[in-house]
Image: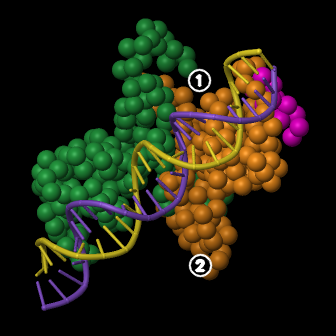
Chain colours: A orange, B green, C yellow, D purple
Amino acid sequence: MEHRLDRIKKELHTQRYKLTPQREATVRVLLEREEDHLSAEDVYLLVRDKAPEIGLATVYRTLELLTELEIVDKINFGDGVSRYDLRKEGAKHFHHHLVCTECGSVEEIEDDLLEEVENFVQSDWGFIVKDHRLTFHGICKKCQDRICSNCEAKRLVAR
Amino acid sequence: MEHRLDRIKKELHTQRYKLTPQREATVRVLLEREEDHLSAEDVYLLVRDKAPEIGLATVYRTLELLTELEIVDKINFGDGVSRYDLRKEGAKHFHHHLVCTECGSVEEIEDDLLEEVENFVQSDWGFIVKDHRLTFHGICKKCQDRICSNCEAKRLVAR
DNA sequence: CTGAGTGCAAAGCGTTTGCATGTGC
DNA sequence: GCACATGCAAACGCTTTGCACTCAG
């Protein structure tokens, strides 16, 4: 954890950006809540616990900066809010998301599911892939159990 | 074309929605510009040519209705605007998109690239997939030729 | 010391909503 | 005729920006 914070600090320094307490607090929040998919507002509220005087605009500016530096990914699940997701260290590709339409929970998939598909797009369409976004919408395990007793069966038959 | 319009009209009728000139004009625009990925504003401007008195709010309401009826898909490429894409008739799945980061052009891929991936998500994660969104960001063929003479070579080596 | 960074409030922008009016069925 | 649909303008929510002030390097 501290290790990753140091890396990010170093990256900021390398790019001639100043290391302000606000920026450090924001990065700390992102590291602590890595599993979540926080909106700017979420981050703002959490950072305020550490640094009460911080402004929402600064959080936006910091998140934009971190996006430019490719330290976080800005993602959008179609609900009108941008969410910010720390990039996994050493990850060659973006992770994918499973968004539950029942409870709104978001799971992450680390596996590289798209290697073949990207090769196809590159060879058959002549499109150089730089980045991708893959999100599945559906029903998570927990909600299946909650709302529907025969979902297990459904799951096996589905598609 | 007329055939698809009739189908949509019938669908509206079946669901007890009124067939107003505004709704018909909006659907016509979507049919005519099927290949584009129009924003609500885009649709509004095009519909206004056919029905000058229409209001932007009506366009939004119509697009929302068509989304509910699964006649169009609301998509979001992360630029802060919702775009509306007519569903292909008889398509079992959503098409995917190639967004060029150079010129902003959007190509569509009809092939079902995700069958295997969805099966994996369903069996290994117990997540019932209802829908997906897949977008690749990168450089389209045209821009490759324009900005970079050795892109052809790059493309073959890439990844 | 100096310019990058900040907080605040105001503005921007896409989208939604309240309400009086209009119109398909 | 009547409920649904529309047009307009105001409201909304997220995000960006202008500006004077602050502080990291």
Residue A148 is marked as: 2
What residue lies at 19% left-to-right and 73% top-to-bottom? B18
Q: Which residue is labeled 1 in the image?
A: B159
Label 1 resides on the chain identified as B
Residue A11 in magenta stretch: yes
Residue extending farthest to the top is: B149
The answer to whether marks 1 and 2 sit on the same chain is: no
Q: Are marks 1 and 2 in contact (CB under 8 Å)?
A: no
Q: CA distance from mark 1 to mark 2?
A: 43 Å
Magenta span of residues:
A1-13
Question: Does A55 sit above or below residue A65?
Answer: below
User: Would residue C17 be found to the left or right of residue A108 on screen?
Assistant: left
- Mark 2 nearby-residue class (10 Å; few <14, some 14–19, many ≥20): few
Classify mark 1: helix, strand or loop. loop
- Of the residues shown, which amino acid type is indicated by label 2? Cys
The image quadrant where one finds the N terminus of chain A is top right
Q: What residue is shown at x 19% (from left), y 51% (from top)?
A: B47
Residue pictured at 51% horizontal, 57% vertical: A79
Q: Quadrant of residue B124?
A: bottom right
Q: Is residue A30 visible?
A: no
In magenta stretch: residue A154: no
Q: Position of residue B65 (x, y in %)?
A: 32, 65
**Callout 2: SS:** loop
Q: Chain of mark 2?
A: A
Q: Main secondary structure of the magenta part?
A: helix
Question: How many numbered marks are there?
Answer: 2
Residue A50 tag number = none
Horizontal arrangement in the rendering, residue D9 relative to residue A115 (left or right): left
Task: Pick the residue in front: A101 or B119.
Answer: A101
